[in-house]
Amino acid sequence: MAKIPIKPIINTIKDHAPRAGKFIKENWKEVVTVVERADAVGKRVNDYRKSKKAVKQNQGKMHFRKARYAHYKTKIMGELDNKKRRELFQYKLEVEQFIRQIKNEEDNELSVKKPIHSKRTKKWKEVLIQIIDKMKIKDYQEYLMLYNNPNYECNYFEGYEGEVEKFKRIINSDDYEELHNFIFSKTGKSKSEIEKDFL
């Protein structure tokens, strides 16, 4: 590791710091004005970059997967709690398809791009894990609500009425082992936790 020469830096500070301090003290109004203007210019540059990115995205110049990733991170991931199972399942399928596309591109292109593809795959896999975990949590919660109240109106399983009917049949059969296995297969919760909640 290279050594950084400290002595010249200290000497420069010793030589110029008193003069700079004196200049700032004498011209503090002008210095404040310059700093404020520099801040305003910085904000304008930042706004310009953001608007240019939005224009690119709107004109379709941004790659579709990249735009979808931005949409997932900014909008969808924050609203997973409010989604129904079919919407979560659709997101899961879409993300899995994106991961397969990246894998195919990686197989068809040069190995030089492998780090780029693996980085993209990793980002999408993080999104997929969040979606799958949210599905499991919500499934478990809804099954528990249905178990405790047979008259519970379950909007979350809209489109999955067959699953609900199967679950109710298992409840009515009083076969707790089958019930626990069903919940385990759908949610992946530990058997001890399931046995505790579904008595």
Image (tube, rainbow, N blue to C red):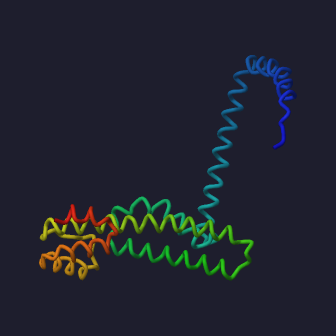
- Residue at position x 56%, y 79% in the image: 100
Image location (x, y in percent) of residue 66: 59, 68
**The quarter of the displayed image where residue 11 is located:** top right
From the viewer's perspective, tell me whether residue 155 is left or right of residue 62: left
From the viewer's perspective, tell me whether residue 59 is left or right of residue 178: right
Location of the C terminus by quadrant is bottom left
Residue in front for this viewpoint, 107 or 92: 107
**The quarter of the displayed image where residue 64 is located:** bottom right
Image location (x, y in percent) of residue 84: 32, 70
Count the marks: how many?
0
- Residue at position x 84%, y 38% in the image: 3
- Residue at position x 17%, y 78% in the image: 170
Location of the N terminus by quadrant is top right
Residue 58 visible, this orientation: no
Q: Looking at the picture, does residue 108 appear above or below residue 60?
A: below
Q: Looking at the picture, does residue 181 appear above or below residue 38?
A: below
From the viewer's perspective, tell me whether residue 174 is left or right of residue 129: left
Image location (x, y in percent) of residue 110: 74, 77
Residue in front for this viewpoint, 116 or 67: 116
**The quarter of the displayed image where residue 130 is located:** bottom left
From the viewer's perspective, tell me whether residue 12 is left or right of residue 125: right
- Residue at position x 39%, y 65% in the image: 133
Residue 165 visible, this orientation: yes
